[in-house]
Amino acid sequence: MEIFIFIQKVFVFLIPGAIFVKICEYFIPHKEKHYYFQLLSMLLLSCLLFLITDIILLPIKLIFNSIIKNLYDMNIFDYIFKLDVTMSKVNFIIAIILSIILSIITIKFQYNNFIFKFLNKLKISFRVSNKDVWTNFIDDKPFVVIRDMLTENVYYGTIIEYSDDSAIRELSLKNVKVFDKESNFLYCLENLYISREHNEFTIEVYNYKNTYKKPTIKGEKSSGK
């Protein structure tokens, strides 16, 4: 019977960490990780979240416990090492709320590179971010030119989705104009999905601000003067 109690305690304990990991994985591009790395991340994050919860509740207990009985009757170390200690509902709910809040903050820091900007100002690091070049390059690009080495076609459109930096790269584009290798216009597409090895295509981004005339491809009318 003790083994079932232990499994139940572990399951409950991992829930806040699992919520944090899954929210971040959903919104932050990442490579697939082995399950034991995810399990370790959930375990460490749950420990951190419950410790923060204990720290938050400790002064509340000291101040209000004489007024509100049994407001805080558990700490995380008791829960881990003693089978007869159950999870406090207050601790569990606060840990869940903290998990959601901290995951949102982590996503915000990740996308805005706050940590690396701060380290750059302190001259501690000169890295731009911890994103791979693939992700950094195609983030927030309005229009791109994809040169396909297999079909030898050229695709001009807007990236709406892209895969992680695995061996097979996937791209989804909208409002696509297709040209042949001689830059002759072929046809238009509402959407395009392309899946290639990382060295089977190139991505180009025009710099319209630093050119006298907007670059045009044969078959497309120029709007520049």
Image (cartoon, grey):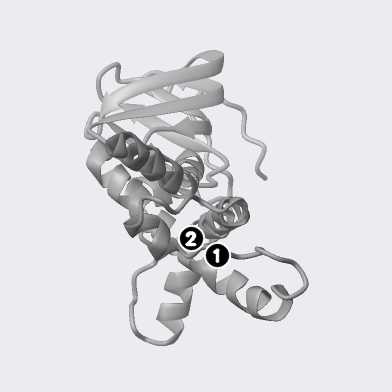
Q: Is residue 91 above or below residue 29?
A: below
**Residue 206: which disc?**
none
Mark seen at residue 49: 2
Quadrant position of the N terminus in the picture? top left
The residue shown at (70%, 66%) is 69
Q: Position of residue 119 (x, y in %)?
A: 41, 79
Residue pointed to by mark 1: 53
Is residue 180 left or right of 196 when viewed as pictured? right
Q: Residues within 10 Å of mark 2 (few under 14, many from 20)?
A: many
At label 2, the amino acid type is Leu
Residue 172 horizontal/vertical position (percent): 47, 25
How many marks on residues?
2
Where is 78 relative to 153, above or below? below
Label 1 neighbour load within 10 Å: few <14, some 14-19, many 20+: many
- Mark 1 belongs to which amino acid? Thr
Contact check, label 2 and label 1, Cβ < 8 Å: yes
Where does residue 98 sit, x and y in percent of width and height?
A: 58, 58
